Amino acid sequence: MRTFLRITAAALPLLLAACAPAPAVRVKGDAALLNEQEARERVLAGTDHWVLQGKLGISDGKDGGSGTLNWSQDGERYEFTVRSPVVGKSFRLSGGPDGALLEGVDGGPLRGPDAESLMLKALGWDVPLRDLRAWVLGLRADGGPAELSFGTDRLPSLLQQDGWNVDYREWDATRQPPVPKKVFAEKPPYRVRLSIDSWTFQ
């Protein structure tokens, strides 16, 4: 897996450059904006059966990787499949309340009690996958306090929670309620860049 990441790291700067955000206009949430966000969260909080497809880039400041992502969420069960466009290899992370399984890695498959601890043990990445499940929908996670800033479209532009800055640069406003199309999360030295091509809700 580490060899795979080192090879695919060559493609990461290209992906990050393609996803690089333009300067954004942001305003702190007033009562009206926060009420609109709470309404979105009430609708989407029960949305736990969906599939997204897109492009993913991850960096820990030293190593990184990029590829196409298929993320399937079925209640508490999840499956991430990432395929590198450079070497054609893929890895799969799946699991649920009974633990997590990481396949396609050197010395694998590997098992762990949850996705976060498994990724930390296997790759040294401290990425809050449980929080990302909420953030990718444009929701505040159930963790610590969150601070929101909004764009001119009255949708979240920046979410700060648990030491992470989650930057929303594009939304799919054709859906009601709208869902994110570009999500960039950062907590130095970690960076996660997700460009979503399609959402499928069940």
Image: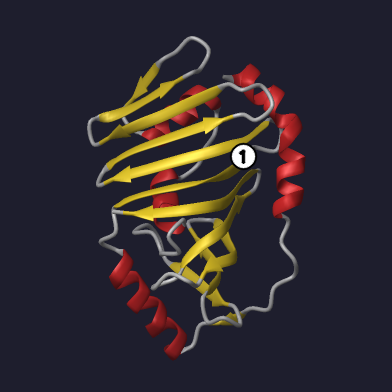
Residue 155 as seen in the image, left or right of residue 186:
left
Residue 130 seen in the figure: yes
| Residue furthest to the top | 107
Q: Position of residue 168 (x, y in %)?
A: 58, 64
Residue at image point 53% right, 82% down: 154
Establish if 151 lies above or below 55: below
Q: Is residue 202 left or right of residue 173?
A: left
* Colouring method of the image: secondary structure
Instruction: Give the quadrant of residue 124.
Output: top right
Query: Secondary structure beneath disc 1?
Result: strand
> Residue placed at 69% from the left, 26% from the top?
86
Query: Residue shown at 45%/58% (left/top)?
Result: 135
Q: Nearer the viewer, residue 119 or 178?
A: 178
Q: Is residue 54 left or right of residue 78?
A: right
Q: Position of residue 197 (x, y in %)?
A: 54, 52
Q: Give above or below for 8 relative to 199.
A: above
- Foreground residue, 27 or 83? 83
Is 145 in front, or is 114? Answer: 114
The N terminus appears in which quarter of the rendering?
top right
Q: Which residue is mark 1?
A: 58
Picture residue at 60% right of the left edge, 50% below the top:
187
Q: Amino acid at mark 1?
A: Ile
Q: Could you tell me residue 126's position as x and y percent?
A: 51, 38
Q: Is residue 165 visible?
A: no
Q: Residues within 10 Å of mark 1 (few under 14, many from 20)?
A: many
